[in-house]
Image (tube, rainbow, N blue to C red):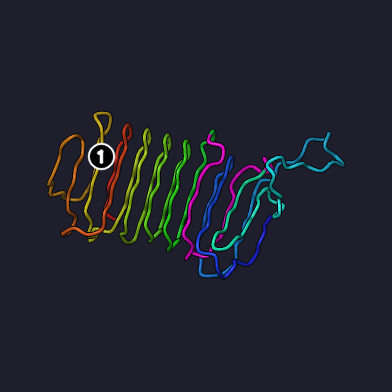
């Protein structure tokens, strides 16, 4: 099942609020919003002949349990009912600045974002975040899940988890000012040679290839992995 609509020419950012489902966000060169779902939930037999009532005050205007609203410069995609299981796949114009949040933080979703060129921001309680080829500024936080970023170029990067692992893969030639915040509960692993300038209060700072854009990695109870892209 799928839904498609044109993106307004004035739209610059997208806000995505998902409760129960995993999401895959694929950036592409285009001007259309496309949403697909793979596992519909069949209503109970007692609902035959009845219409589902959406109690969140929003219309299911996609017939996928999703409300799509475009106002001024902002696109908002919001889950409005427990209508589907599985994974929502969203195809979005890659130039959009993207923000992803939970509107009911009691589920361990998987958020995967690929090939976006705008800035990215996400916050989740239990979800796991996976980023691939996201080239704008990145700020991603999970309280209980992991944060994983596989990047082909550097920009301002902040990855943080309280209880989960943090993994960053970047080109070996990246020029960056690195800050890693850890605790006595976790370890740091890397294949970079780190010329350490400061290592106090569980904060490690280093210059990669002469320094450049800021990269900050933080976890209180999970390991941190910094890898060179092979």
Place of residue 33 in the rendered image (x, y in percent of width and height, measured from the top left)? 60, 62
Q: In which quarter of the image is the C terminus?
A: bottom left
Compare residues 183 and 167 and report the one nearer the observer. 183
Q: Residue at x 38, y 50 (%)?
A: 139
Give the position of the N terminus as an image quadrant. Answer: bottom right
In magenta segment, residue 88? yes
Magenta part of the protein: which range?
81-105
- Report the residue at 42% width, 40% height from top: 142
Residue 202 vertical placement versus 12 (above, below): above
Pick the residue in front: 192 or 109: 109
Q: Is residue 178 left or right of residue 2?
A: left
Instruction: Choose between 216 and 228: the one closer to the eye.
Output: 216
Residue density around tag 1, few if under 14, some if 14–19, many if 20 or more, within 10 Å: some
**Label 1 belongs to which residue?**
181
Give the left or right position of residue 203, taking residue 101 as reference. left
- In the figure, residue 82 lies in which quadrant? top right
Is 82 left, or right, of 114 in this rendering?
right
Tag 1, which secondary structure? strand
């Amino acid at each position: 099942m799928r839904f498609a609509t044109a993106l307004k020419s004035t739209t610059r950012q997208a806000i995505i609020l998902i409760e129960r489902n995993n999401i895959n966000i694929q950036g592409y060169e285009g001007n259309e919003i496309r949403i697909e779902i793979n596992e519909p939930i069949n209503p109970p037999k007692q609902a035959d002949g009845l219409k589902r009532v959406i109690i969140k005050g929003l219309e299911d205007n996609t017939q996928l349990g999703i409300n799509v609203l475009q106002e001024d410069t902002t696109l908002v995609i919001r889950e409005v009912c427990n209508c589907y299981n599985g994974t929502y796949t969203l195809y979005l114009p890659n130039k959009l600045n993207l923000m992803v949040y939970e509107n009911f933080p009691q589920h361990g979703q998987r958020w995967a974002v690929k090939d976006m060129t705008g800035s990215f921001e996400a916050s989740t309680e239990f979800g796991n975040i996976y980023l691939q080829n996201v080239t704008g500024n990145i700020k991603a936080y999970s309280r209980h899940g992991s944060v994983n970023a596989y990047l082909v170029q550097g920009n301002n990067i902040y990855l943080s988890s309280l209880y989960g692992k943090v993994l960053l893969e970047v080109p070996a030639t990246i020029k960056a000012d690195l800050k890693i915040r850890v605790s006595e509960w976790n370890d740091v692993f890397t294949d970079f040679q780190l010329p350490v300038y400061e290592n106090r209060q569980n904060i490690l700072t280093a210059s990669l290839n002469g320094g450049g854009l800021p990269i900050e990695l933080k976890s209180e109870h999970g390991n941190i992995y910094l890898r060179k892209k092979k």
